[in-house]
Image (spheres, rainbow, N blue to C red):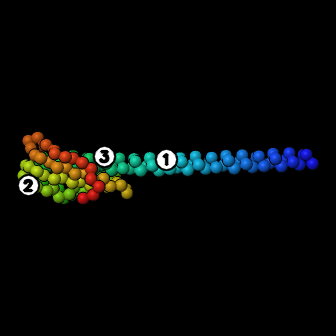
């Protein structure tokens, strides 16, 4: 009778340990998947950010080339597209420039408040905004 009890205890111990290891494995796998998803989200957001900054620089250069540049155009790039909003203000002073970059499901918005365009562009504020 002692042998049956020892076998039951051994079998129960193995089952309990297996269940514990299974729970630990599932927890670690879930954390790894969530970490990868978070990393993908951050990478996508950063790519949209760099795309928006590139588009903003393009719009600034166009404005420096010609004070008549009004923006209001869309630029397709390899990784996504960028929309330059209608540039407000006229002439060399107090211009407002807005840019929206879209990459997959990520959107990034930037806004420049330009004090003077030329001969050297002076920017009052350049900031990220949630939406226009």
Q: Nearer the viewer, residue 118 or 6?
A: 6
Q: What residue does disc 1 label? A: 35
Q: What residue does disc 2 label? A: 90
Q: How far is mark 3 from mark 2, CA to CA?
A: 28 Å
State the residue at coordinates (62%, 47%): 25
- Dot 2: element: loop
State the residue at coordinates (68%, 47%): 20
**Where does the image place residue 71, in percent across and percent down from the top left?**
17, 56
Left or right: residue 110 compared with residue 124 = right
**Where does the image place residue 18, in percent across and percent down from the top left?**
71, 48
Left or right: residue 71 compared with residue 54 = left
**Where does the image place residue 69, in percent across and percent down from the top left?**
12, 54
Exactly how many numbered labels are in the figure?
Answer: 3
- Quadrant housing residue 85: bottom left
Q: Nearer the viewer, mark 3 or mark 1?
A: 1
Q: Which badge, 3 or 2, comes first in the chain's sequence?
A: 3
Q: Nearer the viewer, residue 66 or 118?
A: 118
Q: Residues within 10 Å of mark 2 (few under 14, many from 20)?
A: few
State the residue at coordinates (22%, 51%): 111
**Where does the image place residue 55, in percent across and percent down from the top left?**
24, 49
Q: What residue does disc 3 label? A: 50
The quarter of the picture where the C terminus appears is bottom left
Left or right: residue 127 compared with residue 94 = right
Q: Which badge, 3 or 1, comes first in the chain's sequence?
A: 1
Q: Residues within 10 Å of mark 1 (few under 14, many from 20)?
A: few
Q: From this viewpoint, which residue is outermost toward the left?
A: 91
């Amino acid at each position: 009778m002692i042998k049956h009890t020892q076998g039951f205890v051994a079998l129960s111990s193995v089952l309990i340990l297996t269940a514990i290891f299974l729970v630990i494995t599932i927890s670690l796998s879930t954390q790894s998947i969530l970490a990868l998803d978070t990393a993908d989200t951050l990478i996508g957001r950063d790519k949209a950010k760099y795309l928006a900054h590139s588009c903003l620089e393009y719009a600034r250069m166009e404005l420096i080339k010609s004070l008549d540049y009004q923006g209001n155009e869309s630029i397709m790039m390899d990784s996504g597209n960028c929309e330059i909003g209608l540039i407000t203000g006229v002439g060399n002073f107090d211009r407002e420039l807005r840019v929206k970059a879209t990459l997959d499901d990520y959107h990034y918005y930037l806004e420049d408040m330009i004090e003077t365009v030329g001969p050297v562009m002076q920017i009052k504020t350049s900031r990220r905004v949630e939406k226009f």
